[in-house]
Image: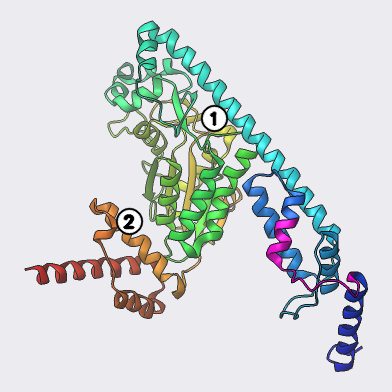
């Protein structure tokens, strides 16, 4: 049968109208039946006590069902849920399927079940955290005695909520320090490094599932062209919550994209939102060099970037960002990509040999993310250990959101309230009109800074 046959279309429309009249009866009232009414009725019936996340998932499922199914199925759904239904104009792109209302009910049942599992995982996580805090408090009381306990009860400083009560050990054998040259006194002179080598060290945690939603929304507003990347970076945290884990543990990842797309800016903002300490280094043109440390027996001895970052932050799971990993060199001094491999394998990283300390350390908590312009110069072993996310170029319609983000960053850098920095309507129009020439966040940021300076000078001239 020819799909473009007008007679066939008329016959189909008549058949649908006859079916609707038969289902509803000739005396049915002509009360309009809309998607919002349908959503409210179905969610109330099928997901009455679910979390906001389950309600949101249910809404999306109902909307998908509504837009992909045909008028006959919607008429049946109206009757099943106590509504009357009148034929409605057929919007472009609708009526593409005939899924019954039972298909939607089954999907909502799955959403409700998964929502219950999420709530159970959250409750288990909070229970574990409370248990850890009780154990840690008991340990502090035993260590500090009654005086310390009284000081805490009288309002001593509370622990940073971003840092866990779960502690780990970095240098697995603190006694190994005595075997270093000069009996480890070189390490002792570095107070921060000595502390993390001899005392338990905390982790950064994400204890509230709502934090993930806030990060997704906040970073999505600041980097509107990178929402898929943001979702990918957050996915491990969501899995951790489902498993009842609070410690921030990210999958090793590579952000690949052209220069100026905002890769490093996004990663630093992502870490800041999570409260993760960050160490960032460009490795373009570098081989192993000193990145992974040199033995304490040498005059040029220095700790690795892992030890330095953990020592500076006092946290076992900081984020280390290596920029331009695709441009790292392989020479007689080694290969950065190859040296990274044991640090990206959790089993090996738990007993990683730190050259400077000449002993095994637990580097399994460290989070690694790399940036690259292209993938063809990254070895297969490193690629296989990482998630890869493509960082797209922003488009012209992203300019205003990006400019607002850049203004906020500039205000923070200058220690000012964002209201003190402004862009005029003509400034924004200029940024949009010129964006297609460069399509670079880096260039856009420089233009915004120049416009801010120009506006400040103009304001000063007017005032004077």
| Residue at the (77%, 50%) spot, across then down | 46
Can you give x and y, in whole percent of width and height, for residue 9 in the image?
86, 88
**Residue identified by numbered label 1:** 350
Tell me if 461 is positioned left or right of 404 in this view: left
Disc 2 + disc 1, Cβ < 8 Å = no
Quadrant of the image occupied by residue 42: bottom right
Can you give x and y, in whole percent of width and height, for residue 309 in the image?
38, 37
Q: Which residues are magenta?
A: 24-41
Q: Is residue 16 above or below residue 195?
A: below
| Residue at the (75%, 80%) spot, across then down | 90
Tell me if 204 is positioned left or right of 450 in this view: right
Tell me if residue 33 is in the magenta stretch: yes
**Residue identified by numbered label 2:** 409
Q: Is residue 171 above or below residue 281?
A: above
- Location of the C terminus (image quadrant): bottom left
| Residue at the (45%, 47%) spot, across then down | 336
Secondary element at tag 2: helix
């Amino acid at each position: 049968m020819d799909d473009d046959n007008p007679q066939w279309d008329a016959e189909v429309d008549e058949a649908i109208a006859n079916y609707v009249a038969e289902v509803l009866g000739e005396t049915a009232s002509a009360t309009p039946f809309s998607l919002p009414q349908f959503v409210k009725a179905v969610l109330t019936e099928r997901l009455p006590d679910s979390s906001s996340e389950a309600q949101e998932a249910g809404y999306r499922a109902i909307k998908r069902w509504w837009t992909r199914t045909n008028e006959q199925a919607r008429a049946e759904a109206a009757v099943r849920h106590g509504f009357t239904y009148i034929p409605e104009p057929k919007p472009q792109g609708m009526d593409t399927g005939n899924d019954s209302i039972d298909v939607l009910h089954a999907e909502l049942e799955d959403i409700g079940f998964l929502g219950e599992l999420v709530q159970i995982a959250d409750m288990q996580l909070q229970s574990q955290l409370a248990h850890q805090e009780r154990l840690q408090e008991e340990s502090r009381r035993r260590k500090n005695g009654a005086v310390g306990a009284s000081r805490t009860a009288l309002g001593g400083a509370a622990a940073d909520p971003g840092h866990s009560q779960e502690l780990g050990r970095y240098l697995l054998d603190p006694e190994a320090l005595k075997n270093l040259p000069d009996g480890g006194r070189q390490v002792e002179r570095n107070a921060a490094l000595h502390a993390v080598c001899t005392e338990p060290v905390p982790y950064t945690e994400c204890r509230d599932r709502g934090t993930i939603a806030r990060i997704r929304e906040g970073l999505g507003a600041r980097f509107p062209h990178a929402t898929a990347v943001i979702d990918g970076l957050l996915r491990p945290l969501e899995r951790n919550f489902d498993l009842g884990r609070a410690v921030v543990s990210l999958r090793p990842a590579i952000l690949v994209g052209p220069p100026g797309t905002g890769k490093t800016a996004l990663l630093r903002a992502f870490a800041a939102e999570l409260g993760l300490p960050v160490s960032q280094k460009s490795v373009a043109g570098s081989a192993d060099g000193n990145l992974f440390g040199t033995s304490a027996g040498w005059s040029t001895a220095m700790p690795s970037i892992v030890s330095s970052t953990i020592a500076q932050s006092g946290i076992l799971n900081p984020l280390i960002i290596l920029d331009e990993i695709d441009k790292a060199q392989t020479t007689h001094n080694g290969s950065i990509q190859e040296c990274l491999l044991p640090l990206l394998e959790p089993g090996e990283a738990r007993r990683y040999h730190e050259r400077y300390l000449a002993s095994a350390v637990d580097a399994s908590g460290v989070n690694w993310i790399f940036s690259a312009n292209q993938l063809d110069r990254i070895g297969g072993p490193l690629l296989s250990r990482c998630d890869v996310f493509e960082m797209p170029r922003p488009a012209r319609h992203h300019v205003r959101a990006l400019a607002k983000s850049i203004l906020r960053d500039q205000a923070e850098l200058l220690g000012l309230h964002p209201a003190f920095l402004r862009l005029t309507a003509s400034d924004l129009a200029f940024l949009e009109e010129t964006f297609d020439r460069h399509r670079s966040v880096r260039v856009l940021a420089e233009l915004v800074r120049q416009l801010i300076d120009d506006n400040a000078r103009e304001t000063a001239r007017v005032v004077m």
